[in-house]
């Protein structure tokens, strides 16, 4: 578990913005990615923005592929809910959430 120093961004702590990136994933994280020039020096925020965007898009894709498999979709929705809460918790506490392939990808994007 890595603890990262989060900086203030115009009156708002970087860890709060990172938690917001998880809040409405992938929409809120896409906002931070589109505004990358404004936040480019905020590595912790951008890492969480890219990671939550990847997780959000992946979950939407899985939901579409499963279609009518109600019970399986319910289990995945429950797991996604806990991942979403855990991602916000880790970001707020200035810790990096490590997801094997997606974390490496998010690091490369930052």
Image (spheres, helix red, strand yellow):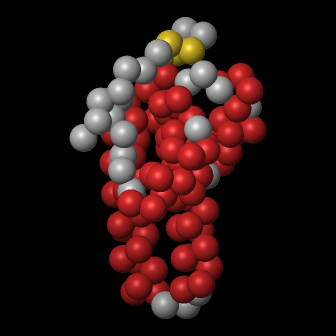
Image-based side of 85 in relation to 34, left or right: left
Q: Place residue 83 in its image quadrant.
A: bottom left
Camera sees residue 29: yes
Camera sees residue 52: no
Q: Position of residue 100 (x, y in %)?
A: 39, 60
- In the picture, the quarter occupied by the N terminus is top left
Q: Residue at x 49, y 22 (%)?
A: 14
Mark count:
0
Most foreground residue, 60 or 5: 5
- In the picture, the quarter occupied by the C terminus is top right
Q: Place residue 36 in its image quadrant.
A: top right
Q: Which residue lies furthest to the top in this view?
A: 11
Q: Which residue is drawn at 48% across and 57% down?
A: 102
Q: Which residue lies furthest to the bottom in this view?
A: 69
Q: Residue at x 34, y 57 (%)?
A: 82
Q: Where is residue 37 in the image (x, y as percent from the top left)?
A: 74, 27
Q: Place residue 60 in its image quadrant.
A: bottom right
Q: Where is residue 96 in the image (x, y as percent from the top left)?
A: 36, 40
Q: Is residue 45 above or below residue 75?
A: above
Q: Which residue is drawn at 44% across and 26% down?
A: 15
Q: Residue furthest left?
A: 1
């Amino acid at each position: 578990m890595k603890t990262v120093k989060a900086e203030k961004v115009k009156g708002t702590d970087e860890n709060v913005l990172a938690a917001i990136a998880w809040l409405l994933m992938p929409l809120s994280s896409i906002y931070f990615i589109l505004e990358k020039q404004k936040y480019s020096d905020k590595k912790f925020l951008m890492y969480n923005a890219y990671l939550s965007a990847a997780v959000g898009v992946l979950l939407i894709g899985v939901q579409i592929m499963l279609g009518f498999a109600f019970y399986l979709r319910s289990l995945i929705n429950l797991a996604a809910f806990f991942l979403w809460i855990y991602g916000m918790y880790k970001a707020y506490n200035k810790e990096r959430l490590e997801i094997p392939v997606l974390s490496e990808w998010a690091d490369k994007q930052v």
